[in-house]
Image (spheres, coloured by chain):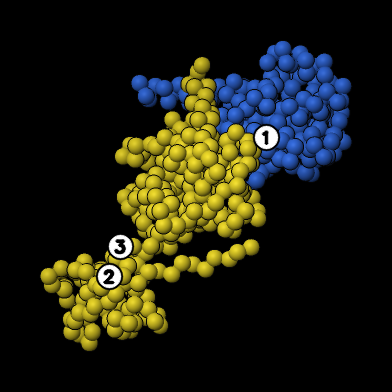
Amino acid sequence: MNALEQLSESTAAAVQLAAQGIVRVEGRRRLPSSGLLWSDGDLVVTAHHTIERRSDVRVGLPGGETVEAKVLGRDPATDLAVLRLPRPSGKPLALAEPTQVRAGHLVLAVARPGESAQATMGIISAIDGGWRTPFGGHLDAFIQSDVVMYPGFSGGALVDALGRLVGMNTSGVLRGVSLAVPGATLARIAKTLVEHGRVRRGYLGVGVQPAKLAKAHEPSGQTTGLLVASVEGGSPAEKGGILLGDVLLSMGGKPLSAMDDLLAALSGEEVGKATSIDLIRGGKTTSLKVTIGERPAPVEEDE
Amino acid sequence: MTQSWLEELSASAAAVADRARASLVTVVQRGRGVGSGILWSPGWVVTNAHVARADRLSLSWGAGNAVPARVRARDLRLDLAILEFDEPFGQPAVFGDSTALRPGEWVFAVGNPWGVVGGVTGGVVIDAAAGRDGAWLALDLHLRPGHSGGAVVNVRGEVVGVNTMMNGPDVGLAIGSTAVRRFLAEHGLAKTITHLDQAA
C-alpha cells in the first residue's frame, strides 16, 4: 500500500471501530441525532438539544436493532442528556488521553443518524483549558475542530486517528462552530445525571456587568467588580438585600472580577448555603449574607 | 521520517489526481457553460444528464482539442447521460465498486469547478449509501459548479461515482458507480462494462 492507501485504510478503520460505540437517537420530530454508548454499555450520552420529548425516545444500536430508551436526565448548560437502555448493548469507545490531543491533530466526526455510520474528517483547530458555555455550564476543555457537522451529527463522537473518543460533537452550544464536549465532562455530568437526574447549579438572581473600580480593592487588589444591573423579584439576591447599583466584590471570600467568577462561585454545592457577599454601595464597602438558591430548570414541553 | 511519509502521502495523492484528470473531459453546451465528463471507453463519455441537456455538444480535453459529441442516452431522473463521439482520445477510466466504499475512506473529485479545468478536491466518504435508494455518495469535499459529471475516484484511482450536486458548501453528492454501471448496462453497453470490470 502507498501512503495514501495507508491513510485511507487507517481513517476508515478508525471510523469502523468508533461506529461500534455509536448509536442513533430518535428523540425529535425531524432527523435523528447520534449518541455514545456509555458506562457498561447500558447508557447513552447524547446532545440535550436533540431530545425534544421525555418519552418515546428510541435508540438504534450498532447491530441494527432499535430499542426503547428512558431519559434519565439532562443538562442544558453543557448540552448533555443521558438515556438508559433496556440492557447492555455494546462496548463504549476508549478515551483518548486528553493531554495528548493537540491543535493540528487529525480527527474524525463519527455519527449514526441513519442505519449505518457516517463520518467527516478534519483537524483540531483549538484546544484549551476549562471553558464556560453561554448557558453557564463548565467544560473541562474547549475543543474546537473543523469537521463538517453533517445533519444528525450532534451527539456523535469526535475521535482521534485510532478511533479513541476525544469528545461528543454538538452544534447546539456555539452556532457555526464544531465544538466537542470533552470526555472528562461527559464522565462528570453523566455520573451526576444518573444519580440525580439533573445538574444542580447555584442561583443568585442578579444581572451583572463588569465595572471598573475607582481604586484597587484591598486586600484582593482587584480593579473590577460586578455592577448589579437587575435583581429578579423573589430571588435569593433580593431576599438577601442586594440592590440595583451595588458593585459586587467577592462571594465567600473569592473575588468577583468577571462574569465567569460569579458563575464559578455558583456551583451546585453552594445551593442552600448562606454565603457572605462583599460589595460597594454608595462608595462604601459593606457585606451581606445571602442564601444561594438553586437555578430553576428550564421549562420543558411535552409533546 | 514523519516528514518523508507525509511527502509520500502527498505524492500518492497527486498521482491519483493525475490519473483521474487523464480521463476527464470538458462537456460544452453552447450558451450553458461547461460541465465535466468521464471518458470510460474509447468513443464514450458518461456524464450528468443536466450537463448534457442539448442534443449537440462538444467535448474538449487537453490543450485546446475539441470534438463534437452526440447524446446516446439520457435519463433525467437518474441524472445520467452517455455521450458518443467519433475520434477516440485520452485514457479511459477504470471503474471501481461504490458498494465497497466505507465511511472515512478517502476519495477525490475532479472536474472543471467554475471553469477551472481539472480542479481537484478531496476528503472522506461521509455516507456510502446516501439518498432514498442508497445509490448516492455523500462526500466530505467541496464540489462547485462545473464539477458535475466529473469522476469521484478512490485512493487506487478507480471511478466510484459521478459528481452531481452540492449539499451546502462543504458536502458533495455523487451518484455511486453501481448505479452508473446499471445505467450503462440498460443501454446496451454491458459488454464494455464487463471489460472494465476485468480491468478493475
Q: Residue at x 84, y 20 (%)?
A: B189
Residue sitting farthest toward the bottom: A282
Q: Residue at x 59, y 20 (%)?
A: B156
Q: Which mark is residue A269?
A: 3
Residue A241 percent location from the top left of the image: 29, 84
Circle 1 packing at 10 Å, graded few (<14), some (14-19), many (20+), is many
Chain of the residue where label 1 is placed in the rendered structure: B
Which one of the lettered chains is coloured yellow?
A
Do marks 3 and 1 share a subunit?
A: no
Residue A148 percent location from the top left of the image: 54, 44
Kindly check if marks 3 and 2 are in contact, taking CB atoms under 8 A apart as contact. Answer: yes
Q: Nearer the viewer, mark 1 or mark 2?
A: 2
How far apart, in angstroms, are the residues tagged by discs 3 and 1? 49 Å
Circle 2 packing at 10 Å, graded few (<14), some (14-19), many (20+), is few
Decide if residue B174 is in sight here: no
Compared with A219, B59 (above or below) is above
Q: Which mark is residue B129?
A: 1
Residue matched to label 2: A273
Question: Hey, what amino acid is under mark 3?
Answer: Glu
Circle 3 packing at 10 Å, graded few (<14), some (14-19), many (20+), is few
